[in-house]
Amino acid sequence: MERLMEHQNMKKTSFTTQELVFTALMTALVFVATYLPHIPIPLGYAHLGDAVIFLLALLAPRRAALFAACIGSALADLLGGFALWIVPTLVIKFVMAEIVYRIGRRGDAIVPRASIIAALLLSSLWMAAAYTLAGAVLYASMSAALASTPGLLMEGLVNSVLALLLLPMLRERFPKF
């Protein structure tokens, strides 16, 4: 009996093959959406990866969304020549996805659009503030970091709108776990 309970507990903490493959694909999607549309802004770049993160946080299982957000974004920083930003990115993207997950969804139930919008905007504001503060620390210059804030805010807005536009279409077709 004890072995059966131990096996059931292990199963809850491990990924199934389907979850592992899905998480790997979503990590790759976050990476590509972050890495390819590289739009330079002071101290870094803007991208469309946050729209993917937002959609995953609204549609995917929590741990798959968090893993894909963190690792996909960190890989884009590493391969894009921004290795200095990997640690801040891991923390910032984790919190971004967590904000959207906690505010923008209630299990599989559809939440009011206003809650989703609030989640996306709060997550975007967190991202802009956190990257601005991280830039001030990494480059020892608050004025240099503040130069990136308008671009970060615009990135958050664009990604939020894109996620809102894609959400109804993807909600019907997204795999259920």
Image: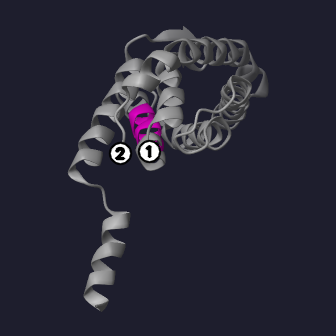
| Number of marks in the rendered image | 2
Question: Could you tell me which residue is drawn at 70 percent across and 17 percent down?
Answer: 153
Q: CA distance from mark 1 to mark 2?
A: 7 Å
Disc 1 target residue: 61
Mark 2 element type:
loop
Observer-side mark, 1 or 2, equals 2
Q: Callout 1: 10 Å neighbours few (<14), some, many (20+)?
A: some
Q: How dense is the environment of label 2, judged by Cα within 10 Å: few (below 14), some, or many (20 and up)?
A: few
Q: Are marks 1 and 2 in contact (CB under 8 Å)?
A: yes
Q: In the figure, 5 relative to 104: above or below?
A: below
Q: Earlier in the sequence, mark 1 or mark 2?
A: 1
- Magenta segment, prevailing SS (helix, strand or loop): helix
Frontmost residue, 20 versus 127: 20
Q: Which mark is residue 164?
A: none
Q: Which residue is mark 2?
A: 177
**Kind of residue at badge 2:** Phe
Q: Nearer the viewer, residue 59 or 33?
A: 59
Q: Amino acid at mark 1?
A: Pro
Horizontal placement of 140 versus 84: left or right? right
Q: Residue at x 69, y 38 (%)?
A: 137
Can residue 80 be seen?
no
Q: Which residues are magenta?
A: 66-74
